[in-house]
């Protein structure tokens, strides 16, 4: 450190004074300095730089189970048997004790759900794989000790939550759900408390105007790092700071808070990567990169899943390519987290202004026709609008009644695109094995998102993955093969140069350059059910080798224009010299 944290010109000190009044800022500073020195003695920091080898599997801690075995142990066995050396990182969705929302209503930040195992299983996973954990820090369960203490009148927890008069004008607040913003809770004496709840009654928002909340949350994040976390996902972070009279989303204090958290964490473990989850319109989403040096190091590329789906639906990549050409980053120290599916649905807000209302309506109808569902949010005028498509990704792309070979091709072209996009790929467990809509789960839970959250008995899944011709095995084997090729090509490094080419509206083309700027990989993705022939620009040198199938594109002796023909939904990764 060039100067001590307590110095007035140190960034941590300055940020605290921008967030809090003088007296509170000083208390916050003292508590954070104590926290930093405490964890410096406990955390062994090791330098790490992202590369093409970084592939992140998104999975629940109890995604696979076997008898009474801790599910995190079963997950590690599955990873070791099938994915070791192919996928090096795991985003374990919230594995803490919880009361709802499949983990995102945390009861205790510092414990592991006993069904999944203990910190021993988490540390075992972190010994072999890089671990991303969730900082579910916008809200906490109503059944947590923190909220129970608040309702019990414990003075320490008095300011941990936001209690308001129910007549307060909250009309400007952006609503991600159609549920009430305030919910009623009874204390031990029968008194009603109206408390801020952005997402549900069981997810009570924390009040970061209390420095004690900030300190408690930072302590939890440091504890995760001590237990092996190397990436921290800040869940629903856009809503974390509240100011009455504003929209209470993307506030300057929100960005200040994220920047503060990053700097505090990096005082102890500078290799830890901060990733923000903000399912909002694209231009708002990318604001969380900050300057490129001070905020999120990775941002979820939320517009990508619906744009890939739209490209399949229309057999046209114009909207996808036009948007992709806007993907400029503030510097080469940050990148996108690319994905097609996650534990949530396919967000529609990120493509507002990119896709027309008619195109979005078409996507909604397609998902409904394929057995999926649609979730809605409340608008400022009281109306409701669709904000998320709930459907397995393969069923969104194709009707479950379609021929399997067609379903597989459509799925793989979208997944290959994610692997080739500039940034780090995130692969949802269900995409890796071609999971279909889990309708029985929705009937049981009453929650739309359950349709893409089915859990598996490991023996059943192993049987599917060993059955020749099964949908699961076909997608799993093909996916693994593409990943195995990707991780050995430094043109897929997250920080190298890239260009998007427009050679045919049916084909999405990414031109990626190697770290030393000597080689390129031209990724061609045919989003149509037609054979497409494209003419390569003259500046692209031949020969090119398709590293997915070892075929060569040679320059003809007549020096004519070089053409490439792609079969329906075919992917090519053409490698050559620049």
Image (cartoon, helix red, strand yellow):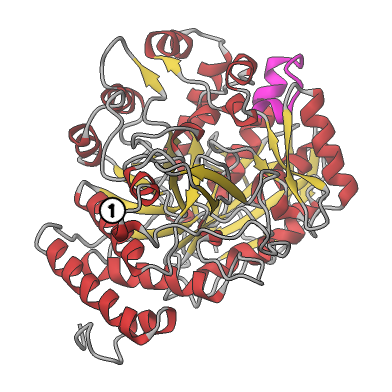
Residue at the (55%, 30%) spot, across then down:
431
Label 1: few (<14), some (14–19) or many (≥20) C-alpha neighbours in 10 Å:
some
Report x, y in % for residue 333. 43, 70
Q: Is residue 311 left or right of residue 440?
A: right
What is the quadrant of residue 145 in the picture? top left
Image quadrant holding the C terminus, namely: bottom right
The furthest residue to the left: 41
> In this orientation, which residue lies closer to the viewer: 382 or 431?
382
Q: Secondary structure at mark 1?
A: helix
Read off the magenta span: 394-408
Residue at the (17%, 34%) spot, across then down:
120
Report x, y in % for residue 48. 27, 59
Residue at the (86%, 38%) spot, across then down:
362
> In this orientation, which residue lies closer to the viewer: 359 or 245?
245
Query: Can residue 557 be seen?
Result: no
Q: Is residue 482 left or right of residue 39?
A: right
Report x, y in % for residue 146. 34, 49
With respect to residue 383, does 513 lie above or below? below
């Amino acid at each position: 450190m060039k100067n001590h944290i307590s110095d007035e010109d140190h960034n941590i000190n300055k940020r605290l004074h921008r967030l809090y009044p003088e007296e509170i800022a000083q208390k916050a500073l003292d508590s954070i300095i104590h926290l930093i020195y405490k964890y410096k003695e406990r955390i062994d920091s090791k330098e790490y730089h992202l590369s093409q080898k970084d592939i992140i599997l998104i999975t629940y801690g109890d995604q696979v189970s076997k008898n009474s075995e801790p599910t995190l142990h079963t997950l590690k066995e599955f990873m070791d048997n099938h994915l070791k050396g192919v996928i090096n990182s795991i985003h374990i969705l919230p594995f803490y004790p919880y009361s709802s929302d499949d983990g995102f209503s945390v009861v205790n930040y510092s414990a592991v759900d006993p069904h999944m195992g203990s910190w021993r299983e988490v540390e075992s996973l972190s010994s072999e794989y890089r671990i991303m954990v969730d900082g579910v820090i916008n809200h906490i369960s109503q059944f947590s000790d923190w909220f129970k203490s608040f309702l019990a009148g414990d003075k320490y927890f008095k300011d941990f939550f936001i209690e308001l008069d129910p007549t307060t004008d909250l009309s400007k607040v952006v609503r991600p759900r159609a549920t009430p913003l305030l919910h009623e809770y009874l204390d031990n004496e029968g008194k009603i408390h109206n408390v801020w709840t952005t997402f549900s009654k069981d997810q009570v928002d924390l009040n970061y105007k209390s420095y004690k909340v900030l300190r408690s949350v930072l302590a939890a994040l440091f504890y995760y790092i001590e237990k092996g976390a190397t990436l921290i996902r800040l869940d629903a972070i856009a809503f974390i700071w509240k100011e009455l009279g504003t929209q209470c989303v993307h506030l300057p204090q929100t960005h200040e808070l994220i920047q503060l958290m990053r700097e505090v964490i990096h005082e102890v473990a500078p290799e830890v990567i901060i990733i923000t989850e903000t399912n909002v319109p694209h231009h708002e989403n990318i604001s969380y990169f900050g300057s490129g040096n001070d905020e999120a190091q990775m941002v979820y590329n939320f517009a990508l899943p619906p744009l890939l789906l739209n490209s399949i639906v229309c057999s046209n990549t114009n909207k996808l390519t036009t948007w992709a050409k806007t993907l400029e980053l503030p510097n080469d120290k940050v990148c996108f987290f690319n994905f097609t599916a996650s534990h949530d649905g396919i967000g529609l807000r990120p493509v507002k202004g990119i896709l027309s209302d008619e195109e979005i309506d078409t996507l909604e109808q397609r998902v409904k026709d394929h057995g999926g569902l649609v979730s809605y949010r409340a608008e400022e005028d009281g109306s409701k609008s669709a904000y998320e498509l709930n459907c397995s990704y393969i069923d969104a792309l194709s009707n479950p009644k379609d021929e399997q070979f067609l379903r597989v091709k459509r799925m793989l072209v979208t997944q290959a695109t994610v692997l080739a996009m500039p940034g780090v790929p995130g692969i949802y467990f269900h995409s890796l094995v071609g999971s279909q809509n889990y309708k029985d789960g929705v009937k049981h839970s009453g929650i739309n998102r359950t349709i893409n959250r089915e859990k598996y008995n490991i023996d059943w899944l192993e049987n599917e993955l060993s059955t020749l011709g099964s949908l699961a095995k076909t997608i799993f084997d093909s996916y693994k093969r593409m990943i195995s090729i990707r991780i050995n090509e430094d043109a897929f490094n997250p920080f190298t140069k890239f260009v998007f080419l427009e050679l045919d509206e049916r084909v999405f083309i990414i031109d990626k350059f190697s770290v030393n700027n000597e080689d390129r990989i031209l990724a061609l993705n045919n989003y149509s059910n037609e054979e497409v022939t494209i003419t390569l620009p003259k500046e692209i040198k031949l020969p090119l080798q398709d590293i997915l199938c070892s075929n060569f594109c040679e320059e003809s002796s007549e020096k004519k224009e070089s053409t490439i023909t792609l079969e329906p939904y075919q992917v090519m990764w053409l490698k050559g010299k620049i």
